[in-house]
Amino acid sequence: KSELRKPGYDQARESISVEVVNSTTGFSGINCVVKGEIIGENIIFEKKFRVLRGEEKVLSFSSEEFPQLVIDSPRLWWPVNKGPQNLYELKLTVSVDGVVCDSVKTKFGIREITSDTNTPDKSRVFYVNGKRLFIRGTNWIPEAMLRTSDERTYAELRYTRQSGVNLLRMWGGGIAESDYFFQVCDELGLLVWQEFWMTGDTRHPQNKIAYLGNVESTVKRIRSHPSLAYYVA
């Protein structure tokens, strides 16, 4: 997550979290080191901790604890036609006894998206990095027959950008889009209005535990993408 300084948007305070799970069955806990790096920015941080068998921990790194996570003059991410789609890359590794046992990489953008309804007709206005954005949106319905490919996804999103659209409403009809879809939206500057598999002509889910588990999993999967603008349940 990024917290940008106002009014100049000239400093970003980053906060990072990662889930660590000890899936071993031994009685003694494991001493671990999680090390993070924002690649190419000379920003490195790490934290030591202990995790018991079967335990799941959320490890957090704040800019208060790690001053190197305060980025001056950040390269901001912008929607299409408003500025460049700058992206950073974060790498996290976890080591046990000096041996790396797992790692993850993710790209992220530094930006702030807000909205309000301070208008005569209470219509919603979006702001990106403090700048008002005129929305030119359209509906996006995932391929119901699951005939998607990276090539087709990229082509359709490229055509969408060329047509002048800057926001996609992800229709909540029951199919989730791929990680690659959000990656390309990040790169092309297309904002996403994300719905959660309930439309006006569907019933509420019978298995609420499964539904809410899906919601939580999806939020964790897509929340780091700068193109994600809005959640609609």
Image (cartoon, rainbow, N blue to C red):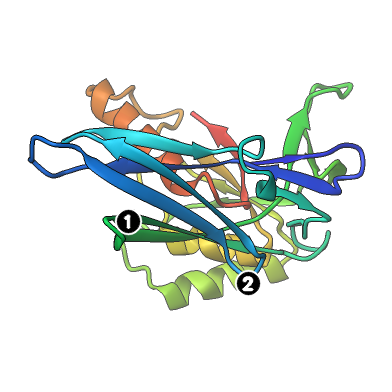
Q: Which residue is mark 1?
A: 95
Between 131 and 103, the one lying in front of the other is 103
Toward which corner of the image does residue 148 lie, by quadrant?
bottom left
Q: What kind of element bears circle 1?
A: strand
Q: Residue at x 16, y 36 (%)?
A: 53
Q: Residue at x 73, y 42 (%)?
A: 112
Q: Nearer the viewer, mark 2 or mark 1?
A: 1
Q: Is residue 4 left or right of residue 195?
A: right
Residue 26 x, y percent position in the rendering: 8, 40
Q: Residue at x 50, y 55 (%)?
A: 36
Between 138 and 9, the one lying in front of the other is 9
Dot 1 amino acid type: Ser
Residue 153 x, y percent position in the rendering: 48, 69
Mark 2 or 1, nearer chain start? 1
Q: Residue at x 77, y 60 (%)?
A: 75
Q: Which residue is mark 2?
A: 159
Residue 117 vertical position relative to residue 108 in the rendered view, above or below? above
Q: What kind of element bears circle 2?
A: helix
The outermost residue toward the bottom is 151
Residue 56 x, y percent position in the rendering: 28, 35
Q: Classify 10 Å Cα crowding around label 2: few (below 14), some (14-19), many (20 and above).
A: few
The outermost residue toward the front is 97
Residues at discs 2 and 1 in contact (Cβ within 8 Å): no
